[in-house]
Image (cartoon, grey):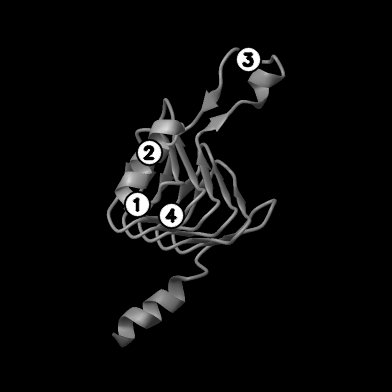
């Protein structure tokens, strides 16, 4: 069975909409996903009722959750609705396996999210390394390396 046949049949029997990435990538809502983007299997992009933007040339590993929604206050009876915040991932960002990007996050271009990192809903500058839980931001971590690479080309 060809990839497209499998994707269609899988989509018909699950909540996974067909997408250009992998049949086991779960996309909800209408995220704006740029060109030359890879999203690995078993990853989720949830843009339900808000904006999720993923720039060009991004590499999102398997088992990543990019999720605009936070329902903990709803579950506790503190509110009557799910809290949803936009997510913005600029160009040339790598997100490692088993990471979570939460609503409100803005990840600057040429940044790396290390595997297993929980990215909180804040603005992160370009060229950063984001690592851990709780996350630590090493701002400008990749700036010199990229500048040196570009000057030698």
Residue at the spot 46% in from the left edge and 64% down from the top edge: 127
Q: Secondary structure at mark 4?
A: loop
Pointers 1 and 2 in contact (CB under 8 A)?
A: yes
Q: Nearer the viewer, mark 3 or mark 1?
A: 1
Q: Residue furthest front?
A: 1
State which quadrant residue 50 falls in.
Answer: top left
Distance of label 4 from label 3 (alpha carbons): 31 Å
Q: Secondary structure at mark 2?
A: helix
Pointers 4 and 2 in contact (CB under 8 A)?
A: no
Task: State left or right for residue 12 relative to residue 140.
Answer: left
Distance of label 4 from label 2 (alpha carbons): 37 Å
Residue for badge 3: 79
Q: Secondary structure at mark 3?
A: loop
Q: Position of residue 117 (x, y in %)?
A: 62, 54
Mark closest to the chain's N terminus, 2 or 3: 2
Res. 1 mark: 1
Pointers 4 and 3 in contact (CB under 8 A)?
A: no
Residue for badge 4: 108
Q: Nearer the viewer, mark 1 or mark 2?
A: 1
Pointers 4 and 1 in contact (CB under 8 A)?
A: no
């Amino acid at each position: 069975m060809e990839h497209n046949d499998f994707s269609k049949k899988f989509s018909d029997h699950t909540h996974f909409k067909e997408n250009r990435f992998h049949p086991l990538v779960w996309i909800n809502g209408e995220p704006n996903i740029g060109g030359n983007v890879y999203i690995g299997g078993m990853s989720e992009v949830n843009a339900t009722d808000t904006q999720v933007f993923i720039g060009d040339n991004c590499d999102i590993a398997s088992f990543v959750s990019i999720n605009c929604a936070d329902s903990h206050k709803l579950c506790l009876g503190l509110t009557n609705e799910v809290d949803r915040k936009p997510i913005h991932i600029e160009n040339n960002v790598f997100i490692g396996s088993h990471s979570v990007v939460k609503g409100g996050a803005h990840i600057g271009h040429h940044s790396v999210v290390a595997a297993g990192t929980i990215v909180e809903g804040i603005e992160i500058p370009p060229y950063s390394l984001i690592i851990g839980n709780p996350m630590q931001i090493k701002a400008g971590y990749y700036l010199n390396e990229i500048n040196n690479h570009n000057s030698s080309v």
